[in-house]
Image (cartoon, helix red, strand yellow):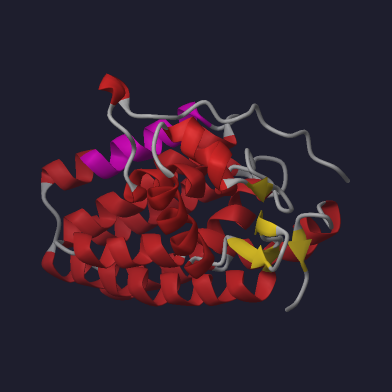
Amino acid sequence: MSMARPSPPETGAPPGGQPANARTIHAVLRQDIVTLRLPPGERLSENELAERFGTSRAPVREALIRLVEDGLIEVRPQRGSFVTRISLKAMEGSRFVREALEVAIIRQAAAQGITAAAEARIEAAIQAQLGARDDPERFTQFDDQYHRALAEAAGLVAVWAIVEREKAQFDRVRFLSLPSTTPVAVLVEQHRGILAAMVNRDPAAAEQAMRVHMTEVLKITRRVAEQYPDFILADL
């Protein structure tokens, strides 16, 4: 089954005419890859990217090196840089790291309790997800907002930064699965369960709810791989 390609990327140089730096270029390209604006197999030209971001090739090259380290692009000798296919093995590694860290986050938050302001931020992220149920890109943005809010509630934002670095392959599978393969209502209900356990200061219940949530992607990986064989390397 093929998937309609999203609209071409529009994000380029930052406002004000200042050239983009490597960090900005990396963030934009990472999002383009996760949301399939740059699909697996797409060739990335340093010259074209430099023009797009209004900069020289040096920060582009630095951003591409970081994307290689993320496992999102590969360099083929004499051919150039290409967006990688989604490795299910790499996705499972990302999921493993994410589960371990997020379980630690919510256990701490549940044990120490969360403020009313933190609860309100988490609930607002859940409501935003409901409003974006038919828009995979916006839904995943609000999903990240929800999980970041959990880390903020626990006072562990630095740990969430580690999760963000590790979850690229996880994000690509997640994006492909929404909304048809993974029901949004199921994910939102799981998010509510995690929040309830934290509010009730029940670390064991919070951990169990998070572990169930983090295994949701495993239920659909094979199905997604069958739907998008050109995008996914079924190497589990």
- Counting from the top left corner in percent of width and height, residue 154 is at 18, 62
Identity of the residue drawn at 29% across and 61% down: 161
The answer to whether 178 appears left or right of 146 in the picture is: right
- Counting from the top left corner in percent of width and height, residue 224 is at 76, 56
* 50 shown above or below 102: above
The image quadrant of residue 117 is top left
Q: Is residue 92 visible?
A: yes
Which is more toward the observer, 152 or 164?
Answer: 164
Identity of the residue drawn at 44% across and 62% down: 66
The answer to whether 10 appears left or right of 235 in the picture is: left
The majority secondary structure of the magenta stretch comes to helix
Identity of the residue drawn at 67% across and 60% down: 84
* 94 shown above or below 8: below
Quarter of the image containing the C terminus?
bottom right
In magenta, the rendered stretch is 121-132
The image quadrant of residue 8 is top right
Q: Does 224 lie within the magenta span? A: no
